[in-house]
Image (cartoon, rainbow, N blue to C red):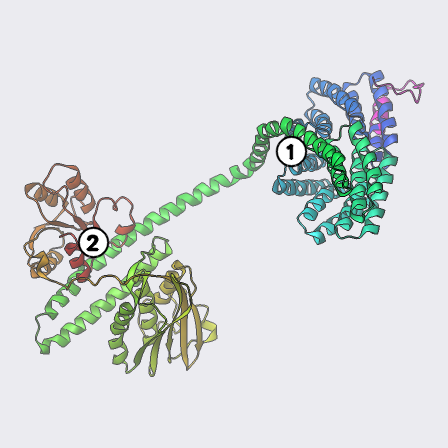
Amino acid sequence: MYLYTSFLITMNLSTKEDTNRITSLLDEAYLCRTNNLKRSVDLAGQSLVLSRKLGDKSLIGRSLSHLSLFQMIRGEYEDSLKMSEEAIKYFEELNDERGVATAKYNIASVYYKTDNYHLGLVNLVDCITTYRKFNDYHNLSRSHKSLGTIYEYFGDIKNAIQTYEDAITAAQKAGDLNLESNAYNPLSGIYLKQKNIEKARELIQRSIDIKKETGDIRGLAFGYYGRGKVNLVEKKFADAEQDLAGSIKIHRDMGETLGLGMAYHKIASLYVEQGDLEKAKKALEQGLEFSSEYNIVMVKYKCYFLFYRIFKLQNDPVNALKYLELYHEQKETVINTQTLKIIENYELITQMESLEKEAKLQVEKAEIIEKKNLAEQSARIKQDFLSTMSHEIRTPLNAVITIAALLSEKTDPEEQQLIDSLKFASNNLLFIINDILDFTKLDAGKTKLEMRPTNFKLLLDSIKNTYDSLAKEKGLSLRLNLDGAVAESYELDETKLSQILGNLLTNAIKFTQQGLVNINIKKTTGTDHTDHLLFEVADTGMGISEDHLVDVFESFSQAQSVRTRKQGGSGLGLAIVKKLVDLHQSNITLKSTVGKGSVFAFELKLTKCVSPVKAPSKHSDILSGKTVLLAEDNLINAMVIGKLLSNWKMVVEHAKNGVEAVEKSKLKAFDYILMDIHMPEMDGYEATRNILSTENPNVKTPIFALTADITAESQEEYLPVFNGFLRKPLEIEKLYEALASRV
């Protein structure tokens, strides 16, 4: 089949001289393919004759592979496939993986340029896998560029762009400007379709400049074609025609069939845009002739579709329908035979990309595992510390605060001042502890919003009244300025909004020596169902210097040094405010002038709702006669809580640990069980599980966790066990409401 008789071999050369001569011929043939394809074919033909005479299988395979490439470019697809298939036999016999890959690249190019996209895909994947193994960036670039064409054909533009960019990267690593510029051309086409004309022109001009610099005449023809498309979109018809005509001339001279067919189709599109339909048909006939002769399916069905458009414009329905049917028939034939096969083999691309990433993942895997283990260990240590600290500090504090609350109901006026001082000091200590614990929970991302219908105006009045006495002690005026357009009730997290405003008010009062503190709430926008409310806390205090504005929301930060400041606190109030406002998906802002005051502001989007029904009057006799099993290892706390429950006329039985609580639960039924969590011998969690899982009179009794451990509510294993969580120090109203709700 392969007869090249343009020269005679008359010299008897040594094996080494023959090898060098053949290698030189092949190198020269490959180099001149860009500007003299006919010479490339002739030189490769000479090398094949010499290689066969020498009997060197490696050189025969290389010669066949080169000839296959050049014949593929010329559109001699049948010869190209046969040469590559023969080359593969030689390379496989020699275990030459790269040789096999190069021959497969030629086969892939033939297939994807005709109508066998799935075979093109399979062969390209094999090529890329091999080239990666040998870090052959030159051939990787060629393969990626071809793979990008297939991606682009079946509409995967994202992967097409990525693969073309991979081709550019590989070309740059190989130091090959021509290969780099080859990928700029199709990338330009994609950006042109995406209406990014500026980017498209930039890339195609870069490609043309490189082709001129390197002397790649064949590549320059594709560059002119790409720039012609850009000019056509911009309606620069004269420039477009000049570029496309230049592309046609070079392709015809070089014997490049695919490029010639593409250029004829595009110049026909130009003539259609100009209204010269007869000239367009002549160009299309030439494009269709080439694409039909060489089975270039992509060009063929594009020509059919353009013929349909032309005849439709000429009011020739018969021919318009004819070419529309040919277009659909041609495209559906390709799609029907290829799509399923492409989908079947598309997984190969994913596998290939996974293999590429595997090396990096393996390197990173150990580091990730180590960091994960350290993070988990750190989280466990922090959780254990918080659990222990909150329990150990808050448990005795519970006794102090509860005793003060009980005594305040019975003391005479002379002793009331001492009780009030005790309550103030203990509550102040509790605020500091809560700041530290709440901040840690927020920092760990364990806090969530609990939105409930709330009487907004009553809540604001309550917050204002709570901090009014604190302001009056310093001779300050605390004002609530509420926009009349604000609704009466919204769905919100009452506790967290109270915490935000409470921290801001505490901060404002603390740093204001004279004047006033304003709570301003204004409706900015709204709909039938929601309102945007702007919250401001403004004071006339000392203000904050510009140097410290960026620091005030940081944890443990205060404007003055800890040693000299008169104000106390943990330094966490504003850090907590920021995290709680973030939790509402909003931002806290600060404007401040030294000596004049500060304004903290944030905006919330709230849903309107019907005002919740007012709760029944507090501390009625609804709990009278109800029985409670109180599991509490701290005797002082047990005494205090027992006294509180007795005030509500409840009957209390005490268990000093979890084991005793389980035993008592077996003897009789209780209306409630209050269970401390941290207890000796058996903790409250295990005791509760035991009560719920064994036959006893209290299987359905409401069991509330009564704990100083603030982490308990966020521990998933606790949630299905307890009917609710009640914190120590006791929040007396919440305890009463929890029990009353179960009557």
Decide: is 522 above or below 293. below
Asked if residue 504 is positioned above or below residue 42 in the image, the reply reads below
Read off the residue under disc 2.
Answer: 707
State the image quarter where residue 324 is shown. Answer: top right
- Residue at point 29% right, 53% down? 385
Judge the density around disc 1: few (<14), some (14-19), many (≥20) Cα neighbours within 10 Å.
few
Locate residue 17, reporting x and y percent: 86, 23
Is any part of residue 210 visible from this angle?
no
Residue at point 81% right, 37% down? 284
Q: Is residue 8 magenta?
A: yes
Q: Secondary structure at mark 1?
A: helix
The kind of residue tagged 2 is Thr
Q: Is residue 559 above or below residue 723?
A: below
Residue at x 26%, y 52% (from the top left corner): 387
Residue 62 sits in quarter:
top right
Residue toward you, 32 or 95: 32
- Mark nearer the N terminus (1 vs 2): 1
Which quadrant of the figure contains the N terminus? top right
Residue under label 1: 132
Look at the image and tell me whether residue 131 can be seen.
Answer: yes
Q: Is residue 676 left or right of residue 204?
A: left
Along the line of sight, the residue nearer the viewer: 677 or 609: 609
Going by the numbered disc 1, the residue's amino acid type is Arg
Q: Which residues are magenta?
A: 1-25
